[in-house]
């Protein structure tokens, strides 16, 4: 896919909605790179890589205020597992239910152009809102949890606690074993 073809996927010709039988569906696929003019798609350690595809699947409707847009955005984000540092890559789906108006209202609607509806600001914003916030852990639960003691947070290690350390329940059987000299 050429760069131009990819970014065209973000510009919906309004002519489609002005026909006698409007073409309301808009499906396109753009590279995350085309959404990065206003900065990278990253929240903390979680990001959508440049070459990831964003699948755009929308229905557009003319309404009295402008154009209503509904549907989904699908892509993949990636991050490092906070414990074992392996790469975590997961699909995310952002729901779309937005309004485009001739005069955009910040936080309320997006700008409706004269000939095109530019999806870029909306797609970008909705993806950023959908990225997970906070600590990401991989799903290789067992291998990853075995690493846990070395990655205890500072809070845990500073805690003064005289009770016996919490044991991994899987090792409870070991408690039954006694060693006699
Ligand atoms: Zn992990």
Image (tube, helix red, strand yellow):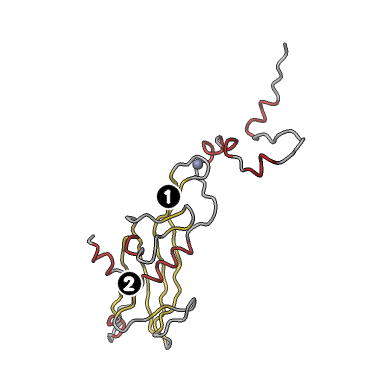
Q: Residue at x 61, y 43 (%)?
A: 153
- x, y percentage for residue 84? 50, 39
Label 2: element kind: strand
Q: Residue at x 73, y 13 (%)?
A: 180
Query: Where is the C terminus found, in terms of image quarters?
Result: top right
User: N-terminal of the two: label 2 or label 1?
Assistant: 2
Dot 2, how many residues are within 10 Å of its Cα: few (below 14), some (14-19), or many (20+)?
some
Q: Which mark is residue 56?
A: none
Label 1: element kind: strand
State which mark lies toward you, 2 or 1.
1
Query: Where is the N terminus found, in terms of image quarters?
Result: bottom left
Quarter holding residue 179: top right
Dot 1, how many residues are within 10 Å of its Cα: few (below 14), some (14-19), or many (20+)?
some
- x, y percentage for residue 64? 42, 88
Residue pushed farthest bottom? 64
User: Relative to 59, is 39 above or below?
Assistant: above
Q: Residue at x 44, y 68 (%)?
A: 125
Residue at numbered disc 2: 26
Q: Residue at x 45, y 79 (%)?
A: 109
Mark 2–mark 1 Cα distance, whole angstroms, equals 27 Å
Q: How many marks?
A: 2
- Horizontal side, residue 60 vs residue 146: left or right: left
Return the residue nearer the eye: 12 or 24. 12
- Horizontal side, residue 19 vs residue 175: left or right: left
- x, y percentage for residue 39? 39, 63
User: Relative to 142, is 67 above or below?
Assistant: below
- Horizontal side, residue 164 vs residue 105: left or right: right
Quarter holding residue 104: bottom left
User: Relative to 59, is 87 above or below?
Assistant: above
Residue pushed farthest right? 162
Return the residue nearer the eye: 50 or 53. 50
Q: Which mark is residue 89?
A: 1
């Amino acid at each position: 896919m050429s760069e131009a073809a990819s970014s065209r996927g973000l510009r919906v010709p309004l002519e489609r909605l002005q026909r006698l039988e409007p073409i309301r569906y808009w499906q396109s696929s753009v590279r995350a790179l085309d959404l990065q003019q206003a900065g990278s798609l990253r929240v903390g350690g979680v990001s959508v890589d440049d070459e990831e595809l964003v699948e755009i699947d929308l229905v557009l409707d003319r309404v009295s205020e402008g154009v209503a847009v509904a549907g989904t955005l699908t892509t993949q984000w990636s991050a490092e597992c906070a414990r074992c540092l392996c790469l975590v890559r997961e699909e995310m789906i952002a729901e779309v239910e937005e309004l485009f108006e001739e005069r955009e209202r910040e936080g309320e609607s997006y700008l409706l152009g004269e000939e095109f509806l530019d999806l870029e600001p909306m797609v970008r914003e909705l993806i950023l809102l959908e990225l997970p916030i906070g600590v990401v852990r991989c799903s290789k639960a067992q291998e990853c949890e075995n690493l846990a003691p070395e990655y205890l947070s500072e809070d845990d290690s500073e805690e003064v606690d005289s009770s016996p350390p919490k044991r991994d329940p899987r090792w409870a059987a070991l408690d039954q074993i006694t060693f006699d000299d």
